[in-house]
Image (cartoon, grey):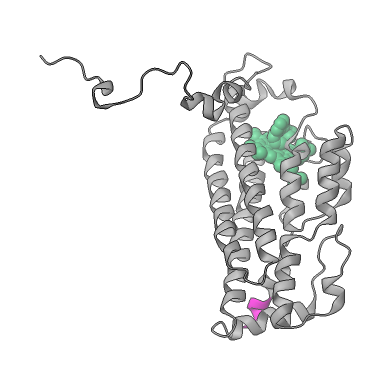
Amino acid sequence: MSDPYDPAREGAQMAFDGRMSYGDYLQIDRVLGAQSPLSDAHDEMLFIIQHQTSELWMRLAIHELSAARVALAQPDVRPAFKMLARVSRIFEQLNSAWDVLRTMTPSDYSTFRAALGQSSGFQSFQYRQIEFILGNRNAAMLRPHAHRPEILAMLEAELAQPSIYDVALRALNAAIPLPAEVLSRDLAAPHAENEAVMAAWSKVYHAPQTYWTLYELAEKLVDLEDYFRRWRFNHVTTVERVIGFKRGTGGTGGVSYLKRMLEVELFPELWHLRTGL
Ligand code: HEM
Ligand SMILES: N[C@@H](CC(=O)c1ccccc1NC=O)C(=O)O
């Protein structure tokens, strides 16, 4: 019998006093110190981790979307494509995660729902920031954050910046001029569907070879919205499955509110032009 295998023999570092380890670099103690269930219910840990991991992925999505917005304002927009593609993949990841949460039945959830009080995903400031960056803007959504001035200020600052779609339209305008009202709209409101924008994107789709970069940009945006829509759909379906038509802890009608959100169109012209092609 040979001795048990020891990775130190091939050089694995085994001593970490005074050296940065895996846990040091990733601050694992802080991450793993942040799960504090309020009940004894077995499934509350699943619920907490599902949300915390979602928030971590949202953090990366915001990092990528913010950089993509800067990149889209440059003369060469192509470096933004990688970032937008990565955000779509992040949403794909979040979409797959619903499969884990769906293992929680209504009976399981009812063992700890009361412990959640009035807290709700509706109050997720990172989610709201993503919606605002993408262009789904509504100043009423700032109110749940009034008690956190720095978060309120961050979201207000977001409403004062052009959305991803606004910067995309500026890039489109450089090739196919758009009306001034599109380029200097009230940034705190959502973009209103516009005939001239649709005509310009249609021109791109009729001649992809001529407008290849804009064509690629448009498809990256459609891809992103496609994955985001799937997230909304998975959410509302999971909610109906778990709480039926009960009101939400956040105070909305629950499924009725979430179904209304399914109607949001972030990049309306990019969807509507397809009918005319
Ligand atoms: C059993 C699981 C879940 C249930 C029953 C549920 C239920 C609800 C309900 C009823 C709402 C409407 C607001 C309210 O009145 O509370 C809502 C909103 C929301 N939830 Fe969930 N949710 C679940 C899981 C999740 C997960 C895993 C996330 C991921 C972060 C999430 C994020 C959100 C967000 C961001 C909103 C606001 C949506 C918007 O304003 O468009 N939820 N949820
Ligand atoms: N709104 C949910 C509660 C909920 O799902 C939740 C509660 C606290 C933190 C995040 C949550 N997730 C999504 O809303 C409900 O009405 O049961």
Quadrant occupied by the N terminus: top left
Percent of width and height locating residue 247: 79, 36
Q: In the shown orientation, is residue 53 left or right of residue 189?
A: left
* Residue 87, horizontal then vertical, whole percent: 59, 53
Quarter of image, res 222: bottom right
Image: 174 above or below 78: below
Which residue occupies 55% across, 54% down?
86
Observer-nearest of 47 and 187: 187
Would residue 171 be visible to someone looking at this image?
yes
Name the one closer to the observer, 206 or 79. Answer: 79
Overall secondary structure of the magenta section: helix
Q: Which of the four quarters of the rendered structure image does ligand 2 lie in?
A: top right
- Seen at 74% across and 78% down, the residue is 173
Q: Can I make out residue 263 in this image?
A: no
Magenta residues (range): 273-277
Position of residue 274 measured from the top left corner of the image (x, y, whole percent): 63, 77
Is 261 colored magenta in this rendering?
Answer: no
Q: Relative to the observer, which residue lies in front, 233 or 225?
A: 225
Image quarter for residue 264?
Answer: bottom right
Look at the image and say whether residue 274 sits in the magenta stretch.
yes
